[in-house]
């Protein structure tokens, strides 16, 4: 690593930078093309088309005029201040352009070209060099690999995205921050087609310098932004992203994210695309969820759902003792088939759809609305009477157990919005979220609802996805939970550990220091096999301990169910003899003799530092089947007991110890305690572990605790 | 059951009926309202608006004129022939209207009102009465609970669906058959908004008489129909549906279905909606798949995917020996983010996305198109050159391993369809299916593709769903596989069995007669406990046999691991004593003494007659976890060995005996054989079983077979 030099100039403060980014006094287009149809000719055309009223300086050494405007051979020739430069040149010319921006005192430069961190090691090195240039000059960067910045209020269309061919750039109240450049155009065009507009859209590209977290913090207090939409390929700068999320939560502005990388192939594309390190997708989802960022599954949900969350906070989580009702959604429809599609999909996603209770049915009856106790409240003919639609919604919203209402509008939505769509408008931003699914093609109704600030969904699937996302929205975790007392012993063990990893014995000792019960054991040196006292409960397991033989079973290094001391000695001798023959060069630390424990179930508890989101803790059921079903729960580390209990509930394979079919219940409190204890490794940053795993952790009956039987741990950088 | 009376008049033949339904000479609107905005006033208005040129007879006893047309007090007063009557009256008046239709020699009557089978037992009885009336007169029925019939070529808008308010009814080449009436309007309005039109749309309602299967057969040879879209809430008339599917397959017309009922709530809504019996959703999907009906997951896929399948047959299934390549899709894009969304979703759905191999990369290079060996073929700038888009598609389609190509078009699709959308047109109905996902809002491109006959998808999710559906499309199973020889013994057992069900002993004997190995056992009469010879391999299990005690374990009626004859006698005596005390009135057939067997894994093989689709066979892994994960495979019974092997591959929980992580492989051929054998119960219809289950079936190592350890069977009507 090169020692960072002191910057020659301080970078702009956040508000100056925000202005430079989205409402610059002067914009330089470095490499502006005279051909308005070429990519490098577009930004100038779009700035003009959409009425940007700051100064625009095309920089082109070959031509005194570009697209009818005066052009400049270089930045030095520009007469006015340049707040923002868009570098439209090909990759090889970018470093010089950044040097020029640095020299000219530009505040922020956006770089179009890819071929940096997105193109392998050499590109990454090049990206680091231009970042260094920029840092020295107090110049901030967007990109490389950025399609640009669009600010609809400032009419700044500083982008090459062809979606800006559109007639008018309407200002809205959503700010978009996207790793994908093309997606800013997608959102703009799809949104505007149905009356959904944006405050600004920023294509952040490789995030060499300015990343989503810092940009989010820059705009979170913007009075013209109600919500943020993120299109994510990875997580970079997690501390800034977390700070952004906490601030957004504090002032009631939801952040909604669509994240690529559900599949392995998708994840590789997402990360190679902008040169990120591959973190795990489950870790990414845990990060988003625990920071109060709503994650949607479907593309259109991203821009359809914001009104469900704007101005609201995540619902209080139901209490574990069952004294609070679970979140339930009421679905009202004017058409059986359309409504059934939504109920069906909601239930598939695990959202409970509530049938109206007798009190609600009676209140509706007072309005002459006859409904049955079905999860689908079918208004049939009453669905064509605005007063009855109004009365139904008001009644349901007024009902304490309703968390949200979905209104499904059938054919009247297409030609008669006044019947069942118009009456919904007064429920915008009311006491409960209202989502609308329009069953036919119904453009006028769609725009009417968008204008009113009501979430209108085009498909039953996005409607259900939006509700699911809303109801699983969480309050952000607190900034930095303090480490508990008593981690000193564990810290000392890590400091003193030789080598790159801990063997089973050292790992279980570490888990013990964290407060996790481990199976009683003793280490017998090979030469002391016949003399070492073995005051353990029998039967025992005998295992070889060697830093060179991590896969003990496969080398014949494990014997189970050994019943007494003479047997231990016999088995141990045979094992040592076998290993000496097959692996003569393996270093032997000894034999681990361990009391065999029994539990109701086996669990795997893991700790890992994810390259994207940092320390995480994982819980899975033990055994082959749990592995096959890829059934695990992931949370950020360190975690707390309530969260650990949620993890236990999430793992399907642990159902047998949660009381499934009357089977004996396991010690879930002790299991939660072990999860929390292992997650404390995140505090031990002096010599940080890359990963640690307890496998298996035996879960005994309620009150009898858990016991770690085997484990491993590995330091970072190994 | 009332004895069916001989009909007074023969029903119309299929072609006469088809004409009466969709191109009638005369239409009667029974209960036509003078108010064109009322539901019962709409059909007349829509018929006129869309230019139906047959005779329309409003029937209204209170008015000589309705909506400006001459009205008639009753059917008898109508001067011309009435091929089709639409009964618009409320439920109580329907029976009289059907009597009148029968008397007037109407060929088909469509009934709007619900309140029949969809409203409980009394409604069902009423529905049966009107059906009886109709049958006697050779009158066919659509509905009750039908929104009507729309034929776009004949300009027959015989419906009350408000979607018909649209300006022009454009004729297309898709026929829609829907349980939901509102969905015909949904498809019409959503389709027409993007250039997708229909040949006809029929709302079949409760299917009291004419069901989707018969209607499908009626129109399958229609030269103006290329494909059928079904919106299903249940399966009624499975033989007709199967015959329709076979004919459609034979002449290359795909049938594509969206089916409600994924969740329990959704299933209840779907079935209560039109009064169907609840069949299992997995059984329904098995029925569709095995009859070559493509099932889509998302609503929009239903009308977006047809061009992918029209004129094609299901792809040949890859051979089990690995000598054929698995289906793989190539994804080409002009935009990284948009393309990554599709790849990500495809892989999530289990569709393999192929990276171009070196030969393909070289051929593209010859066209000056540089791509890497990534699953996403990103054209970047070449994506704005029509010749390069053309060359890329042609190259990929020409490549033998490509099964289908997805083209993702970014921002150019919105304002410049000529760049990357227009070049796709020539690949319509070519050698390989081509799907297009348009990333931005791109209405002109959408229509251009629809007109060309290319599948254009609005969302990445529907695009992936369409590809998944296409690649999992199967050739229909053959009509009626003949029963194998040797079922006589099993048939005789069923004939002679006393009571409503078979106990463990009788059930395993039945499985044995079907050719499934069972654990050796003997039944010891209580009084012969001390004398009965026990020439079995030990250890054994001892179990109580009683028709009154099906849950043997819970009453202390099972002992495992009994090691020798004296122990059997002691255990048996204790068991008999205990049962005599706790269940003195239980009838005892004796004690079952059975050799304990061991296997690599346990499986559950079940047979059941589903109320919708008929006999099915189910395979699951044994044990609690398999139950928790709801991990099973379902097929129609009887089935064959190849299908049974597919089932084994589908059950995740059987991975350990399929060679997962080097674990010993089970006797999968024997397991497949047992599945096929149990499925043969579908042939034994003389005294049919409602269900039979082998649980567990132990699967031994390859070559060592399977053995049934426990089971049960229950006759129909119990």
Image (cartoon, coloured by chain):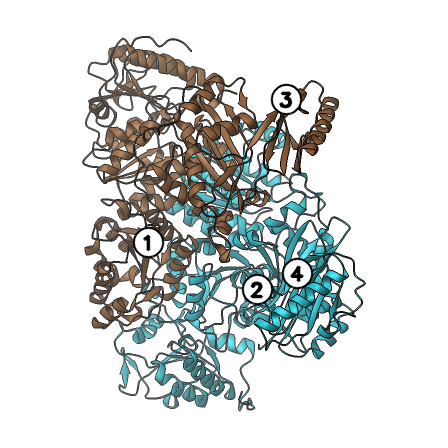
Chain colours: A cyan, B brown
**Same chain for the residues at labels 3 and 1, yes or no?**
yes
The chain letter for the residue carrying disc 3 is: B
**Label annotation for residue A559:** 4
Decide which of tag 3 and tag 1 comes sooner along the chain: 1
Residue drawn at the location 27% of the way across and 8% of the way down: B8
Determine whether, in the image, residue A129 is placed left or right of residue B153. Answer: right
The residue singled out by tag 3 in the image is: B525
Disc 3 and disc 1 in contact, CB within 8 angstroms: no
**Of the two numbered discs 1 and 2 in the rendering, the one whose residue sits closer to the viewer:** 2
Seen from the viewer's position, the closer of residues B514 and A40 is: B514
Q: Position of residue B232 (x, y in %)?
A: 39, 34
Find the distance from the CA under tag 1 to the CA under tag 4.
46 Å
Q: Position of residue B295 (x, y in %)?
A: 37, 42
Q: Write down the residue under mark 1.
A: B327
**Which is more toward the observer, A405 or B708?**
B708
Compared with B578, B168 (above or below) is below
**Mark 4 to mark 2 CA distance (whole Å):** 12 Å
Viewer-nearest of discs 2 and 3: 3
Residue corresponding to mark 2: A554
Q: Residue at x 69, y 66 (%)?
A: A572
- Label 4 SS: strand
In 3D space, how far apart are the residues under numbered discs 2 and 3 (Cα atoms)? 50 Å
């Amino acid at each position: 690593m090169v020692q960072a030099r002191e910057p020659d100039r301080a970078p702009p403060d956040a508000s100056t930078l925000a202005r430079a980014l989205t409402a610059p006094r002067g914009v330089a287009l470095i490499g502006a093309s005279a051909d308005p149809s070429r990519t490098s000719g577009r930004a100038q055309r779009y700035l003009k088309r959409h009425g940007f009223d700051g100064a625009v300086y095309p920089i082109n050494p070959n031509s005194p005029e570009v697209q009818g405007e005066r052009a400049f051979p270089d930045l030095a020739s520009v007469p006015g201040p340049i707040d923002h430069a868009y570098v439209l040149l090909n990759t090889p010319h970018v470093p010089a352009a950044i040097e020029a921006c640095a020299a000219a005192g530009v505040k922020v430069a956006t770089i179009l070209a890819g071929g940096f961190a997105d193109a392998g090691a050499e590109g990454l090195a090049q990206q680091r060099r231009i970042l260094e240039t920029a840092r020295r000059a107090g110049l901030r960067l967007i990109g490389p690999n950025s399609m640009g910045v669009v600010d609809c209020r400032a009419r700044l269309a500083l982008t090459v995205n062809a979606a800006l061919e559109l007639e008018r750039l309407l200002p809205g109240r959503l700010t978009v921050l996207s790793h994908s450049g093309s997606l800013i155009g997608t959102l703009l065009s799809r949104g505007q087609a149905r009356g959904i507009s944006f405050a600004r859209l920023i294509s952040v590209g490789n995030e060499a310098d300015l990343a989503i977290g810092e940009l989010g913090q820059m705009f979170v207090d913007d009075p013209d932004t109600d919500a943020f939409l993120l299109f994510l390929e990875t997580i970079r700068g997690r501390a800034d992203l977390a700070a952004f999320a906490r601030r957004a939560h504090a002032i009631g502005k939801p952040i909604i994210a669509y994240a690529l990388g559900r599949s392995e192939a998708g994840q590789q594309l997402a990360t190679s695309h902008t040169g990120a390190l591959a973190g795990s997708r489950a870790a990414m989802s845990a990060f988003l969820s625990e920071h109060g960022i709503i994650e949607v599954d479907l593309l259109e949900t991203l821009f359809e759902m914001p009104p469900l969350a704007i101005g609201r906070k995540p619902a209080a989580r139901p209490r574990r003792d069952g004294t609070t009702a679970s979140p339930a959604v009421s679905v009202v429809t004017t058409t059986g088939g359309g409504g059934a599609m939504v109920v069906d999909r909601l239930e598939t996603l695990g959202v409970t759809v509530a049938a109206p209770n007798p009190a609600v049915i009676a209140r509706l009856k007072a309005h002459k609305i006859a409904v049955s106790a079905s999860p689908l409240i079918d208004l049939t003919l009453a669905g064509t009477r605005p007063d009855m639609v109004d009365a139904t919604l008001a009644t349901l919203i007024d009902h304490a157990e309703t968390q949200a209402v979905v209104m499904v509008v059938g054919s009247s939505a297409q030609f008669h919005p006044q019947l069942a769509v118009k009456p919904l408008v007064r429920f915008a931003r009311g006491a409960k979220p209202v989502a609308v699914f329009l069953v036919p093609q119904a453009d006028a109704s769609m725009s009417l609802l968008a204008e009113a600030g009501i979430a209108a969904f085009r498909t039953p699937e996005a409607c259900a996805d939006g509700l699911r996302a809303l109801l699983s929205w969480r309050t952000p975790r607190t900034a930095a939970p303090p480490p508990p007392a008593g981690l000193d012993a564990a810290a000392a063990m890590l400091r003193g550990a030789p080598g790159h990893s801990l063997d089973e014995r050292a790992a279980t000792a570490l888990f013990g220091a964290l407060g996790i019960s481990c199976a009683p054991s003793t280490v017998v040196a090979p030469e002391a096999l016949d003399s070492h006292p073995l005051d353990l409960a029998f039967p025992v397991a005998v295992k070889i301990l060697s830093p060179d033989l991590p896969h003990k079973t496969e080398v014949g290094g494990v014997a189970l169910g050994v019943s007494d001391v003479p047997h231990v000695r016999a088995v141990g001798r045979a094992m040592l003899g076998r290993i000496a023959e097959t692996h003569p060069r393996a270093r032997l630390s000894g034999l681990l003799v361990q009391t065999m424990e029994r539990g109701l179930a086996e669990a795997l508890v893991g700790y890992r530092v994810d390259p994207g989101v940092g320390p995480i803790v994982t819980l899975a059921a033990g055994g082959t089947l749990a592995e096959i079903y890829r059934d695990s729960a992931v949370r950020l580390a360190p975690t707390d007991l309530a969260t650990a209990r949620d993890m236990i509930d999430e793992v399907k394979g642990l159902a047998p110890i949660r009381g499934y079919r009357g089977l004996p219940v396991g010690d879930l409190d002790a299991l939660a305690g072990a999860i929390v204890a292992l997650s404390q490794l995140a505090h031990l940053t002096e010599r940080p572990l890359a990963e640690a795993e307890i496998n298996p952790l035996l879960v005994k009956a309620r009150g009898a605790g858990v016991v770690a039987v085997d484990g491993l741990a590995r330091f970072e950088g190994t």
